[in-house]
Image (spheres, grey):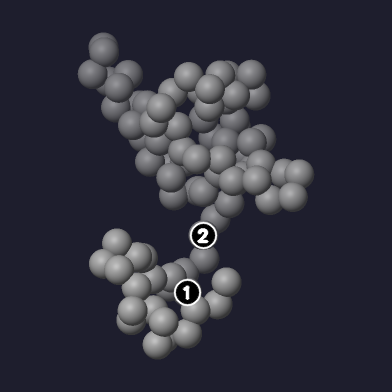
Amino acid sequence: MLVSRRHMAAQPDGYRKMDNTAIQLMTVGDCCKSGRFSRATFYRLVKNDPNFPKLLKIGSSTRVRGDRWDAYVDSLSEQDDEAA
């Protein structure tokens, strides 16, 4: 949805303006490769972990925002470091 500048100024404080930076979208396979786990583990994390990044459905494909995925994987590695 395109929003004119006049309408953007009238939005509430919590409204985030879009900038022109590209957002990387990762497939489930890409996430599994970078996280080094199986598709089954990926979907188990989707179901059971409340901190898991939101999945995006684009047509019939599932994607995850790359920046949020990287932050999630970093948080998993920090949890492993604290447990050791």
Q: Looking at the image, do the residues carrying marks 2 and 1 touch, with CB atoms under 8 Å apart?
A: no
Q: Residue at x 23, y 18 (%)?
A: 82
Which residue is depicted at the point 56% across and 40% down? 55
Q: Residue furthest bottom?
A: 6
Crowdedness near tag 1: few (<14), some (14–19) or many (≥20) residues, C-alpha within 10 Å: few
Left or right: where 23 falls relative to 63 = left
Q: Position of residue 79 (x, y in %)?
A: 30, 22
Q: Is residue 21 left or right of residue 64?
A: left
Q: Which residue is mark 2?
A: 23
Q: Residue furthest right?
A: 60
* Front in this rendered view, residue 29 or 4: 4
Q: The C terminus is located in which quarter?
A: top left
Quadrant for residue 70, please give it: top left
In the rendered view, would you say 14 is above or below 4? above
**Residue 43 or residue 76, whichever sits in front:** 43
- Rendered location of residue 17, percent (x, y): 38, 71
How far apart, in angstroms, are the residues tagged by discs 2 and 1? 9 Å
Reply above or below: 41 against 13: above
Q: Looking at the rendering, in which quadrant would you find the N terminus?
A: bottom right
Crowding around mark 2 (Cα neighbors within 10 Å: few <14, some 14 to 19, many 20+) is few
Q: Please, what is the three-letter code of the amino acid marked with disc 2?
A: Ile
In the shown orientation, is residue 5 left or right of residue 82? right
Q: Which residue sits furthest top?
A: 84
Say which quarter of the image contains residue 39: top right
Please state the horizontal and vertical placement of residue 12, each as a whole percent of the image.
30, 68
* Horizontal and vertical percent position of residue 6: 40, 87
Q: Is residue 42 visible?
A: yes
SS for tag 2? loop
Q: Which residue is mark 1?
A: 20
At label 1, which amino acid type do we have? Asn
Name the residue at 44% across, 49% down.
67
